[in-house]
Amino acid sequence: MKKRLITLLALAPFAVLAQQQYTINATIGKIKLPATAYLAYQEQGRMRYDSATVQPDGKFMIKGTVSMPMKAFVLLGQNGENLKSRPNPDQIAIYLENGIIEINTTDSLIRAKISGTPLNQDQQELIASLMSIKHKEAQMNADYKKLADNSKEKAKLKELLERLADSRMQVQESYIRKHPNSLVSLNLLRSTIDPNQYPEKATALFNSLNADLKASVAGQSFLSKIGKAKALTVGNMAPDFILKNTKDQDVSLSSFKGKYVLVDFWASWCGPCRKENPNLVKAYEKYKSKNFTVLGVSLDGGENAKAKWMDAIVKDGLNWTQVSDLKGWASYAAQLYHINAVPANFLLDPTGKIIGRDLRGEELNKKLATLL
């Protein structure tokens, strides 16, 4: 549970503000005793914890002081439950700040409502705005699991889930723009808008925040990520790297200058990558005689990584240069290109300039047909 909390609380920004004295008053309607409430937050790089026994009337109170307003999590263990044994504990995100924070629920923190202080009112507004989407997503995911091998129905449901994800994004963007002075907006921006995937959107939303939020440590950290992501947008020169090929020979990206090259990040364990490989093979065979090639960068790692990598190359018929340091997500090239999901690719022109990103299937073919 501790590792999960650290991941969740990495989103809490820090700034130089006055100390905050908070009181959490909570009421849980149908409580199963014995029950314990836990408070977890990160301050000055360290995890902090507090707890309180839930009384027979379902009430508990936690008081404390933190150096600045910050995001925290309240977790609930009922019926003597050990939260360490649960991958997804019953919890709710709140903000620690001056004042009394009210938490009220009929039975669990997942369905709780929070109020009492400005940031927690903002947080409750965000929760309410996403509630209907959250319920629809849960129902669709449950339906998806029941479809078994019905690929046609699964495809339809997947499309609906993608549309719902777009709706969620729109609601989140709207919230950030309507609350430019709220720490909740900065946290939401950091957790939902990846600058590597949406550099322009990340920039626009960041610029919509007030000066204090942008100047905070968390704000400046996010701005730095935007800067690094923009260096990999279309029109910029692709950063060079050197990795070993399947024969343990050094291969540099710069050695491909003079050709159009698709830098393809993939892995033998990646289902979507393997599914896309036939499309890539067709594009390669069609345009390899027209000054086009592919450089495959594998994110394979762990036990028998090279054998699995080599086997996938043969099975999928990937007849272009392949390189890897076999370090998985810690791959030097993956870190350099800020890769956090595969498949991913960058199309470079003969000078090494990025002219396309994440081109797959027909989209890649259309782009190559235009160029070549």
Image (tube, rainbow, N blue to C red):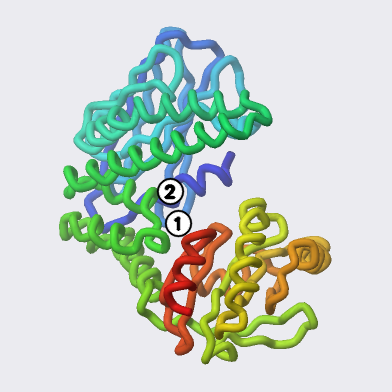
Apparent side of residue 69 relative to residue 191 in the rendered image (left or right): left
Answer with the quarter of the image where residue 146 lies: top right
| x 35%, y 38%: residue | 168
Q: At x 45% / y 8%, what residue is drawn?
A: 30
How many neighbours does mark 2 have within 10 angstroms: few (below 14), some (14-19), or many (20 or more)? many
Q: Is residue 14 above or below residue 107?
A: below
Q: Residue sitting at 72 percent across and 64 percent down?
A: 301
Total numbered labels = 2
Dots 2, 1 in contact, CB < 8 A: yes
Residue 13 - label: none
Left or right, 19 with respect to 255, comes to left
Amino acid marked by disc 2 = Gln
In the picture, the quarter occupied by the N terminus is top right
Disc 1 designates what residue? 45
Q: Return the residue at label 2.
A: 42
Residue 279 percent location from the top left of the image: 61, 61
Left or right of 289: which side holds 340?
Answer: left
Q: Residues within 10 Å of mark 1 (few under 14, many from 20)?
A: few
- Give whichever of 253, 185 is nearer the camera: 253
Residue 121 or residue 326, whichever sits in front? 326
Q: Amino acid at mark 1?
A: Gly
Q: Position of residue 159 (x, y in %)?
A: 47, 38
Distance, label 2 to label 1, CA atoms, is 6 Å
Relative placement, left or right, of 297 versus 357 is right
Element marked by disc 2: strand
Q: Residue 114's spot in the image, x, y percent?
A: 30, 26
x, y percent for residue 256:
57, 88
